[in-house]
Image (spheres, rainbow, N blue to C red):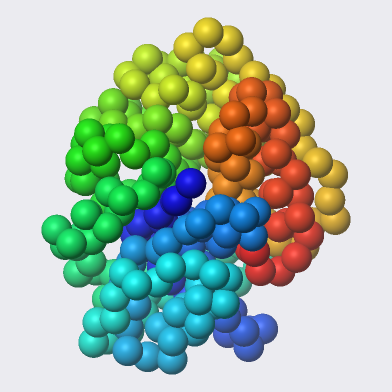
Amino acid sequence: MRVAGVGLSCIDLYENLNCSYPTGNSVDFVIHLSRLGIETSMVSVVGTDEYGKQMADVLRGEGIDISHLHVAEGRTAMFRMDLNGNDRVHKEKMEGVMAHFVLSAEDIEFIAGHDCVHTNFSGRAAGSLPVFKDRGLTTVFDFSTRVNKEVESALPHIDYAFFSYGKEDEFIQTYIQWAQRLGPRAVIATLGEHGSLAYDGTRFYREGIVPAQVVNTVGAGDSFCAGFMYGVFQGEAIQDCLHRGAQVASHVVARFKPY
């Protein structure tokens, strides 16, 4: 099993705490999968600054293939961050070299040599989803909080769609049923402290959280996705995959960094 993360790689900078760390939806996803024993790659771009080197060093240290982590003249993408209690606060986004990131034909061929690909809209790779699906890859897409009909064009090319929502209600139940009918094998909604909800075209599945002493909620969704997909790769049932996701997420929220 080989899994490629594609798209956004950025630095979360907490100036008031005098610290920073590499992150991004697919970055966190492949780091957690690598720690679970899955062979992973990251396809993205960083700048020629120290933050670009920091990103490459962290990914390399996690055993992730960075042969297609490109380096472009300029600044690595960055979020200026703050904390409101245990909740992250995005103060400012600076796209840096990510603003011009485009997958090359060679990147696409490299990704096509994997079994699974993970990305999101910030990754600037959504246009390549039909190619990945046609090449037989399992496609995983993180829609974050975009629970709206604007995502309709992407759904037919996705196998596992992940959304973030605040609680289980009639809206999210109806929404993930609608989304699943457009193509995904399963649609999953993480619900914060209320656990998670999934739908596979046949039935709903529900799972609670694994209790933890919350330090920082950054990366909870990405780590949940990694745990869930690890269960999928092991051939587990959706209910068990939801529990795996909750287990991985519980470890993440109990530390400052999302991995």
User: How many numbered callouts?
Assistant: 0
Q: Is residue 173 left or right of 47 when viewed as pictured?
A: right
- Which residue is outermost to the left? 105
Q: Residue furthest top?
A: 202
Question: From what the image shows, is residue 207 above or below residue 99?
Answer: above
**Looking at the image, can residue 82 be seen?**
yes
Quadrant assignment for the C terminus = bottom right
Q: Report the front residue among 5 and 211.
A: 5
Residue 244 placement, left or right of 72: right
Picture residue at 41% right of the left edge, 56% below the top: 5
Regarding residue 146, the answer to whether it shows in the image is no
User: In the visual, does 221 lie left or right of 155?
Assistant: right
Point 51% across, 57% down: residue: 39
- Locate residue 233, reporting x and y percent: 55, 37
Where 123 sits versus 257, above or below?
A: above
Q: Residue at x 68, y 24 (%)?
A: 239
Place residue 146 in its image quadrant: top left
Q: Is 215 drawn above or below residue 1 in the view shown?
A: below
Q: Position of residue 186 (x, y in %)?
A: 48, 24
The spot of residue 164 in percent (x, y) is 54, 39
Specify whether 12 is left or right of 104: right
The residue located at (62%, 55%) in the rendering is 37
